[in-house]
């Protein structure tokens, strides 16, 4: 591996240097975090749909339309390696080869590494590189199976879902969740029989609330309308920041809440504490607002409380750190995939919030509580 100075590399990426962009992509794919990338406001377009729907052909045509408008465009083509041979990647490269001489186009094919990776972190890293390098549009192509299509909705501003006529199970797929992630439906291969039928089926689901466009990606028919449609859509907000991981609260085990409050409220002058007893956990709780997060003082109800055991073993102090995530089920699935010790299935806590705990052995020594945002 070459030695690179990250600061220099990032500076070159920000200038739009192609070699630097390629190196940055490689580093991101190896799991490295790059500091100092500043976004330039790229429109991130997700393209997803079932295998063979024509996504790569469609993306290639979309690139041509976007280039025709004088904009620079990057493509991240994601292939789940568990389902594909290397030939598919090669196929994508050949399919999009006509753009390879074009300095305004950058294409990166990436195999997801199954259990080790998952789509989101690396793809988001690549998107950030292209955004920083000044590409006006970044297209992320993923096969619409399982988690990846949901992840793409998290990192794209707008998502086009491609469906093809005559496959019979499209509407099933829509009902299984594609519906929410699609901002725009594309009936590709509309040169084939059944396009009208599929149109009516989708329309019956979306009731005019989402655009449905027809394309023939092999000829480029309908592609200009797709580009116009994508630009007209409102951008999703929670984009490019899949999770902020804000600290919701710090849990502090204390022998006596009253005594601790003499410091936090008396000596320090913090505001009112919200007090309650959580019978299930055998713990008295006092919550103190601390800016946008809180301090949670925990006092055991009796010696069988887990807090009592903690005090006995470790003494008073930080018991856990609680962070917010947008979607707990997604977070749990991902942590398990990565081998983290998640201690419980998501459950509803006292304040009505959904949470899990993660074992300190996986987190650098502190018990981590994850709480679903807005739950
Ligand atoms: N008749 C017709 N064929 C098309 C159309 N669009 C794509 N195809 C063909 O469909 C096949 C699959 O196209 P791809 O672009 O590789 O599809 P994909 O969705 O990227 O496939 P995967 O990445 O393997 O999931 C190719 O043989 C294309 O030429 C279309 O609009 N009409
Ligand atoms: Mg493809």
Image: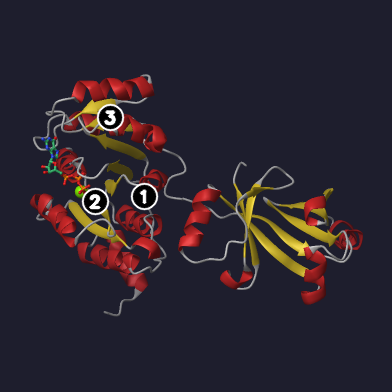
Q: Are marks 1 and 2 in contact (CB under 8 Å)?
A: no
Q: Is residue 35 left or right of residue 286?
A: left
Mark 2 CB near ligand 2 (8 Å cut) = no
Q: Is residue 354 visible?
A: yes
- Quadrant for residue 316, please give it: bottom right
Residue 148, numbered label: 1
Task: Estimate the spatial distance between the alpha carbons at disc 2 and disc 3, rounded to whole Å.
Answer: 19 Å
Residue underneath mark 2? 74
Q: Is residue 51 left or right of residue 289?
A: left
- Callout 2 environment at 10 Å: few (<14), some (14 to 19), or many (20+)? many
Using the image, determine if residue 140 lies above or below residue 338.
above
Q: Residue at x 37, y 37 (%)?
A: 178
Residue underneath mark 3? 229
Q: Are marks 2 and 3 in contact (CB under 8 Å)?
A: no
Q: Nearer the viewer, mark 3 or mark 1?
A: 1
Residue 267 position in % (x across, y down): 88, 61
Label 1 secondary element:
helix
- Callout 1 environment at 10 Å: few (<14), some (14 to 19), or many (20+)? many
């Amino acid at each position: 591996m070459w030695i690179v100075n990250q600061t220099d590399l990032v500076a070159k990426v920000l200038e739009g240097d192609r070699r630097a962009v390629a190196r940055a992509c490689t580093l991101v794919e190896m799991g490295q975090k790059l500091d100092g990338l500043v976004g330039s406001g790229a429109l991130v377009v997700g393209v997803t749909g079932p295998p063979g729907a024509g996504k790569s052909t469609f993306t290639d045509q979309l690139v041509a339309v976007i280039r025709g408008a004088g904009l620079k465009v990057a493509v991240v083509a994601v292939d789940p390696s568990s389902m594909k041979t290397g030939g598919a990647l090669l196929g994508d490269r050949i399919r999009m080869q006509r753009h390879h001489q074009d300095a305004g186009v950058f294409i990166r094919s990436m195999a997801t590494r199954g259990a080790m990776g998952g789509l989101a972190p690396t793809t988001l890293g690549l998107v950030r590189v292209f955004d920083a390098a000044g590409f006006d549009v970044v297209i992320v192509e993923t096969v619409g199976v399982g988690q990846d299509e949901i992840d793409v909705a998290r990192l794209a501003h707008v998502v086009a879902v491609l469906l093809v006529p005559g496959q019979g199970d499209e509407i099933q797929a829509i009902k299984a969740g594609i519906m929410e992630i699609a901002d725009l439906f594309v009936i590709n291969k509309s040169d084939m029989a059944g396009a009208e039928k599929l149109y009516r089926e989708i329309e019956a689901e979306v009731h005019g609330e989402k655009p449905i466009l027809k394309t023939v990606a092999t000829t480029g028919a309908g592609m200009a309308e797709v580009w116009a449609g994508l630009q007209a859509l409102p951008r999703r907000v929670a984009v490019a920041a899949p999770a902020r991981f804000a600290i919701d609260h710090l849990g502090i085990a204390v022998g006596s809440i009253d005594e601790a409050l003499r410091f936090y409220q008396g000596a320090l002058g913090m505001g009112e504490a919200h007090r309650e007893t959580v019978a299930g956990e055998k713990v008295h709780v006092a919550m103190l607002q601390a800016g946008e997060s809180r301090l949670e003082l925990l006092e055991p109800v009796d010696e069988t409380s887990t807090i009592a055991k903690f005090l006995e073993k470790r003494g008073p102090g930080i018991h856990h750190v609680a962070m917010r995530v947008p979607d707990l089920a997604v977070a749990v699935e991902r942590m398990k995939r990565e081998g983290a010790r998640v201690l419980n299935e998501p459950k509803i806590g006292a304040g009505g919030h959904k949470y899990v705990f993660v074992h300190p052995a996986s987190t650098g020594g502190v018990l981590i509580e994850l709480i679903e945002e807005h739950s």
